[in-house]
Amino acid sequence: MRRPGPSAPDRTRRKGIVMELFVGIDGGGSKTNAVAMNAGGEVLARAEGGATLIRPEAPGAGAALLADLTERAVRLAGGSLPAAGLCCALAGAGREPVRRALAAELQREGVAVRLRIVTDAEAAFYDAFADGPGILLIAGTGSIVWGRAEDGRTARAGGWGALLGDEGSGYALGLAALRAVARAHDGRGEATSLAATALAHADVDAPEALIAWAACASKREIAALAPAVAAAAENGDAVARRIVEEAAGELVAHVAALHDRLGPWKTAPGLALSGGLIAPGGPLRAAVVEALRVHGPACTLAEGKVDAARGAASLARLPTIPAVG
């Protein structure tokens, strides 16, 4: 459904200055964030919505949510649709057919004059490094590393999903904890405080009940165990500590693999850490930083927080985005 609004790029007046509005959206499995930005790169408004899950069999299914969030961000910034540019950064949007299908649905919504669909990793990377070289490691529910070489080559590692990859992710930590609880209950593994933690998290009374819970739980629900695993490791639980160390090692291996593929480097590349597990204040950040120091390739760690929605809004400002409609 095409939404009402002017046919020209949206302009709103603040302090007597006419400005175009650009919207960036970072969609994930738990929530979706939107940023409205003016042509000068100033963030004017933020909005939050529910999860945006890109399903390969129905990639356009999330278009209505994205359109509603775009409209809300534009109106919070004082404007009306359509926005001058919209960039949606979405997990699962790496394949071109998926991008085209979703773009077609968004075109029908009429929320923006120019439109771009990218992955969440691309937008986060742009926020961290713009069009320069660097390496971005993302670890949240899933895990992936994305980078650009000094000569402009790009590559990624990881991001294979829960069945084939996502090593070092929140989901991997949660699943490892549940498996450790099962082994301990059988007597095949060391006793761990994670048993009580897992039972409380799943709201069940016995380890055997974790079978049914895990079979029905979402990736996000299992990944939600990750902070408790990190806390148990800090409190001296040997099983949790091994799980955390293994996860940190897997994430460092992602970085090392991409560092090698994109090399040789004249200078040590910047390395940004993003995602709920390893962003500043994240439960696994300290372990990953230490593992990078001991085992990682030569990189310069970026301390600032990476904002994929802000990166997407910055991409929406680029004049290379094709017009739609």
Image (cartoon, helix red, strand yellow):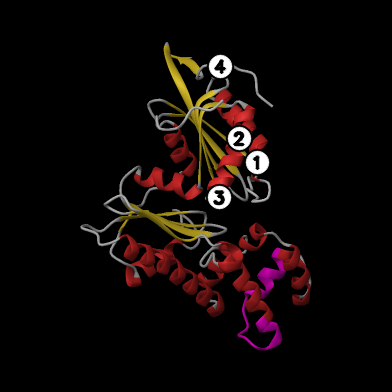
- Neighbourhood count class around disc 2 (C-alpha, 10 Å): few under 14, some 14–19, many 20 upward: some
Can you tell which mark lies on residue 104?
A: 2
Callouts 1 and 2 close, C-beta under 8 Å: yes
Q: Quadrant of residue 43?
A: top left
Cα separation between marks 1 and 3: 14 Å
Callouts 4 and 3 close, C-beta under 8 Å: no
Q: Which residues are magenta?
A: 183-201
Can you tell which mark lies on residue 60?
A: 1
Q: Residue furthest bottom?
A: 187
Tell me if 208 is positioned left or right of 75 in this view: right
* Image coordinates for residue 225, horizontal then vertical, percent: 62, 64
Callouts 4 and 2 close, C-beta under 8 Å: no
Amino acid, disc 2: Ala
248, above or below 63, in the image: below
- Neighbourhood count class around disc 3 (C-alpha, 10 Å): few under 14, some 14–19, many 20 upward: many
Mark whose residue sits in front, 4 or 2: 2
Q: Residue furthest left?
A: 266
Residue closer to the observer: 308 or 76:
308
**What residue is drawn where x is 62% and y is 75%?**
193
Residue closer to the observer: 155 or 225:
155
Mark with earlier residue (1, 3)? 1
Residue closer to the observer: 179 or 164:
164
Residue closer to the observer: 29 or 259:
259
Callouts 2 and 3 close, C-beta under 8 Å: no
Q: Locate the C terminus by quadrant.
A: top right
Can you tell which mark lies on residue 7?
A: 4
Dominant secondary structure, magenta: helix
Mark with earlier residue (4, 2)? 4
Amino acid, disc 3: Ala
100, above or below 187, in the image: above
**What residue is drawn where x is 46% and y is 55%?**
281
Amino acid, disc 1: Gly
